[in-house]
Image: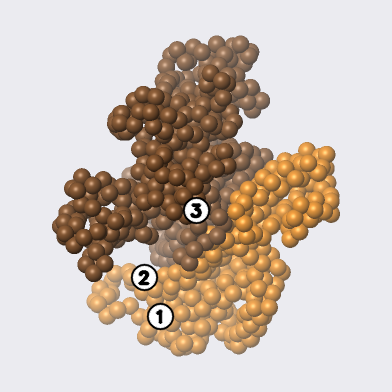
């Protein structure tokens, strides 16, 4: 039998909780600092503007492209390679004026005139500033709604201290992932927002498994203290946590390396988020609940169910 | 104890998986390049058309894979994209403008599968190429138009009632009637009060003014009508463009989504979709001086418009006829080889025209060309401000009473005549629109995305499968069976749900599901290991393992499902695609991981006494 963790002994997770808190606090503060200093590199979906992706036959001459654009009044354009030497991405900020939605075609024909290469239109995206603002608002709203719904669900199914612990862990994951994107200057677009919500989904999955075990162990073993019970539950679920994280990380690596440029940000956010999510469901969620004083009495099933002792305990 | 499933449970698992496999099957047959022929206004697609199509293909030496006439459409399947373009051009020439010839991809699903409703998954624009527009409708203009009509109605009715007014005009969204005397005011008040549903009358006796104000309900109704009318008209225009399987849908209060798969030339698409050009026919006011009006003294009941000669023309405010009554319009040339548009009207339009021209023989009538252009600026409510450009394109003396058919001249070029005819055929937008979001994807990028997505799914899947066998041995094999079944289920369900679309983030969702779906089995197997360590018999370990893991799995998945639903509710386009595959994946994985693996484990290990489990 392969085993990742020998489970004969209970591992003293809670003993290291202060260390974990210091680590998390440092990371969260660093993230917030980075978010306020560097800010997020908002993608087209949120800022509005125009993005044009073109494919050249041979390696594209970026300075020449910049010169062409400069000469035609598109001085503010960002020109960069996208994935390969042949692929070029041009991004133009929203501009005052009527013809914003015709910009893409204009630039495409400009490039075609100025180069002997066959230029293939791969992608043109235009987002009006109004739509961008709405998406930002909706995105933030979605994040808060998700956290709130999960808070309510766990509070109903388990207990409010565990719910607060779980949501605290989720907020921790979201802030750190945002911090990473801000620190590395990675583009934050709609797919990354989707990934962030998926991170919430994954992390809560992990946390629920741990909470479930904490409750079960509180009900099963009466002689242990809260700290010992939580340590026990974390030890019991340890190998599951590691294995599921591993399989998820495996598929995300496949996505990261093979999924292509368009979902690179998505894969990055998930990869980082899953690792952080695994750590936070072990350390942040349960130690927060512990600090809030979760105890056996809070998790005992309601009185009525004690009448039928021969029944399976209800979850 | 033994672990056995009742027969019905085993059967259920088999039937569900067989169904999913059956409906997932069409996806492996792929798609054929095809040309789709449908009729535009005055034509029908019948066996005669079919004959023409077959003859045309023979003439250009193309051996089609199949030519079928179905539901008023002909679908020609060919072997390559080069043939597809060739066939389209030839058919366009042979059939003329009464038919719409569009490029399409037709699923190559065998007949027996198609007969039971088997279709491949719908691919999003990011996987097949095409263009996506989000358009915003100018609501202020929609209400303005309705209020202009209201003004004309009130003016006509008060005239008939012999109530004299100083002026009747539109002021923002009110129609304002200014009366001359107290008697007229009283008469108008009693006549107009409660006369028009959806309007309230605001009275001001001191100034002898009456205001007809739209109620909130009427305002909302007007705006709803404007949107749905615009959707209909955009649909007509998209059909005129010849696009296969377009999507035209309302989104939110004042937006419309248009998706045109396969379209690359966005310039023409935008020109046609966004055009607001329409015509109005009005009598020329030849009793008053144009010069006076140009000095700012426009007579009451008339309006001044620029004409194409650089001057101005004074027209009556009353509109004889608007573009809405036009049923057909074709471009051509008149005797002097100048471009013209021939127009046919519907019954009501014909009556209006004939009534108006009957009494005005010998008088000049003008054709007014109206177009809205977005200024790129927004008002304080963040609505786009449109500029209304109206121009008199021709003035002609009415020679005789006009009926349902007539023609207009004075058009600059043949191209303009063609576009105008197309726009008149498809109908005028009831309110102008502006594109607020546009995404165009080339076909090569679409193909590349499918390849990348598939690669990621295959590799992710292989990595997980290898890991599971190494770690859980025989039980790992069972989990892998469940994982495979889960993939088939996701694809089957995606193909079965008519609205579900596969996008690139959707494929990422499938990859993620593959990684997370084993979680349920990991939970169960870890429990079984614990039970074995606690010295339970293998059969008891299986039983308790599944039982105690169940509620954990439920809780964990319900919370993830909540996230997927929120993502679906707020997401647009590709992100929605991610939410769909994630949600479907969560549900199917619970079925395969809990019920599916149990069926296999029960069948293999459950029915006999064993001492050791390979977990």
Q: Is residue B86 visible?
A: yes
Way the structure is coloured:
by chain
Which residue bears the numbered disc 1?
A: A160
Which residue bears the numbered disc 2?
A: A315
Q: Nearer the viewer, residue A76 or B552?
A: A76
- Quick one: which chain is brown? B
- Chain designation of label 2: A
Q: Nearer the viewer, residue A146 or B525?
A: A146
Q: Residues within 10 Å of mark 2 (few under 14, many from 20)?
A: some
Q: Which mark is residue B295?
A: 3
- Chain designation of label 1: A
Q: Nearer the viewer, mark 2 or mark 3?
A: 3
3D distance between C-alphas at marks 2 and 3 = 86 Å
Q: Residues within 10 Å of mark 1 (few under 14, many from 20)?
A: some
Question: Residue shown at 47%/29% (left/top)?
Answer: B408
Quadrant of the image for the C terminus of chain B? Answer: bottom right
The image quadrant that residue B308 belongs to is: top right
Q: Is residue A66 left or right of residue B77?
A: right
Q: Nearer the viewer, residue B238 or A272?
A: B238
Of helix, strand and loop, which one carries label 3? loop
Q: Nearer the viewer, residue A251 or A257?
A: A257
Q: Is residue B121 left or right of residue B60?
A: left
**Badges 2 and 1, same chain:** yes
3D distance between C-alphas at marks 3 and 1 = 77 Å
**Badges 2 and 3, same chain:** no
Question: Residue shown at 47%/71% (left/top)?
Answer: A144
Question: Residue shown at 36%/34% (left/top)?
Answer: B325
Residue B113 coordinates in the image, percent (x, y): 45, 29
Q: Which colour is chain A painted?
A: orange
Residue B430 coordinates in the image, percent (x, y): 41, 45
């Amino acid at each position: 039998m392969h085993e990742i963790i020998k489970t004969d002994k209970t591992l003293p997770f809670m003993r290291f909780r202060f260390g974990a808190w210091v680590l998390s606090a440092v990371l969260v503060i660093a993230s917030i600092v980075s978010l306020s200093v560097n800010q997020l590199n908002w993608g087209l979906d949120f800022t509005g503007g125009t993005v044009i992706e073109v494919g050249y036959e041979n390696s594209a001459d970026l300075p020449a492209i910049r010169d062409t654009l400069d000469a035609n009044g598109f001085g503010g354009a960002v020109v960069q390679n996208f994935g390969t030497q042949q692929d070029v991405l041009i991004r133009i900020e929203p501009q005052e004026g009527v013809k914003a939605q015709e910009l893409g075609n204009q630039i495409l024909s400009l490039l075609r005139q100025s180069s002997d290469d066959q230029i293939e239109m791969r992608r043109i995206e235009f987002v009006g500033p109004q739509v961008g603002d709405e998406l930002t608002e909706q995105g933030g709203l979605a994040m808060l709604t998700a956290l709130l719904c999960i808070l309510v669900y766990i509070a109903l199914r388990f207990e409010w201290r565990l719910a607060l612990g779980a949501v605290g862990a989720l907020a921790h994951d979201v802030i750190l992932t945002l911090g990473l994107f801000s620190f590395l200057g990675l583009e934050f677009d709609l797919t990354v927002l989707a990934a962030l919500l998926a991170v919430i989904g994954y992390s809560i999955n992990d946390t629920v498994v741990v909470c479930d075990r904490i409750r079960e162990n509180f009900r099963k073993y009466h002689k242990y203290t809260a700290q010992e019970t939580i340590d026990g539950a974390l030890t019991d679920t340890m190998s599951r946590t590691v294995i599921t994280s591993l399989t998820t990380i495996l598929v995300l690596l496949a996505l990261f390396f093979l999924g292509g440029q368009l979902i690179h940000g998505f894969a990055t956010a998930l990869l980082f988020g899953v690792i952080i999510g695994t750590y936070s469901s072990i350390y942040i969620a349960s130690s927060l609940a512990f600090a809030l004083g979760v105890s056996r009495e809070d998790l005992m099933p309601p009185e009525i169910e004690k009448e039928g002792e021969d029944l399976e305990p209800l979850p | 104890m033994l672990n056995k499933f009742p027969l019905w449970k085993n059967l259920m698992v088999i039937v569900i998986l067989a169904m999913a496999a059956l409906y997932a099957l069409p996806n492996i047959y792929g798609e054929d390049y095809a040309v789709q022929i449908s009729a535009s206004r005055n034509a029908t697609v019948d066996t005669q058309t079919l004959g023409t199509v077959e003859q045309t293909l023979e003439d250009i030496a193309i051996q089609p894979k199949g030519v079928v006439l179905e539901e008023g459409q002909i679908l020609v399947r060919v072997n390559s994209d080069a043939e597809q373009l060739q066939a389209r051009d030839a058919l366009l020439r042979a059939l003329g403008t009464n038919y719409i010839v569009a490029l399409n991809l037709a699923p190559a699903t065998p007949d027996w599968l198609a007969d039971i409703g088997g279709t491949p998954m719908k691919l999003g624009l990011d996987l097949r190429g095409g263009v996506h527009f989000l358009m915003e409708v100018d609501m202020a203009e929609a209400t303005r138009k309705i209020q202009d009509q209201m003004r004309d109605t009130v003016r006509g009715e008060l005239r008939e009632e012999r109530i004299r007014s100083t002026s009747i005009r539109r002021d923002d969204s009110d129609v304002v009637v200014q009366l001359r005397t107290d008697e007229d005011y009283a008469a108008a008040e009693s006549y107009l009060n409660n006369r028009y549903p959806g309007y309230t009358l605001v009275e001001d006796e001191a100034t002898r003014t009456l205001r007809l104000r739209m109620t909130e309900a009427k305002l909302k109704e007007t705006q709803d009508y404007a949107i749905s009318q615009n959707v209909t008209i955009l649909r007509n225009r998209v059909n005129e463009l010849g696009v296969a399987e377009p999507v035209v849908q309302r989104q939110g209060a004042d937006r419309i989504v248009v998706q045109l798969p396969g379209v690359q030339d966005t310039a023409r698409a935008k020109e046609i979709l966004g055009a607001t050009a329409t015509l109005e026919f009005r009598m020329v006011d030849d009793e008053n001086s144009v010069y006076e009006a140009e000095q700012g003294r426009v007579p009451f009941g008339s309006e001044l418009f620029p004409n194409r000669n650089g001057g101005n023309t004074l027209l009556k405010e009353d509109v004889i006829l608007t573009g809405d009554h036009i049923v057909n319009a074709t471009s051509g040339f008149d005797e002097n080889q100048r471009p013209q548009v021939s127009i046919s009207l519907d019954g009501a339009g014909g009556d209006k025209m004939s009534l108006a021209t009957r009494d005005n023989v010998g008088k000049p009538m003008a054709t007014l060309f109206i177009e809205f252009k977005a200024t790129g600026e927004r008002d304080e409510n963040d609505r786009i401000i449109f500029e209304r450009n109206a121009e008199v394109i021709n003035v002609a003396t009415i020679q005789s009473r006009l009926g349902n058919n007539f023609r207009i001249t004075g058009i600059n070029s043949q191209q303009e005549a063609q576009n105008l005819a197309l726009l008149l055929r498809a109908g005028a937008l009831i309110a102008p629109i502006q594109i607020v979001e546009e995404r165009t994807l080339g076909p090569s990028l679409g193909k590349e995305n499918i390849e990348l997505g598939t690669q990621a799914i295959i590799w992710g899947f292989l990595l997980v499968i290898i890991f599971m066998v190494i770690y859980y041995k025989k039980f790992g094999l069972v989990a892998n069976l469940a994982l495979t079944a889960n993939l088939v289920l996701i694809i089957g369900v995606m193909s079965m749900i008519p609205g579900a679309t596969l996008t690139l983030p959707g494929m990422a969702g499938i990859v993620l599901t593959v990684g997370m779906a084993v979680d349920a089995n990991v939970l169960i197997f870890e429990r079984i290991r614990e039970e074995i360590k606690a010295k339970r018999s293998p059969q008891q370990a299986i039983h308790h393992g599944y039982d105690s893991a169940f509620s954990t799995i439920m809780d964990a998945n319900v919370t993830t499902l909540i996230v997927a639903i929120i993502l679906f509710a707020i997401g647009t386009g590709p992100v929605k695609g991610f939410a769909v595959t994630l949600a479907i994946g969560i549900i199917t994985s619970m079925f395969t991981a809990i019920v599916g693996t149990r069926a296999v484990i029960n069948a293999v290990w459950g029915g006999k006494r064993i001492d050791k489990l390979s977990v």
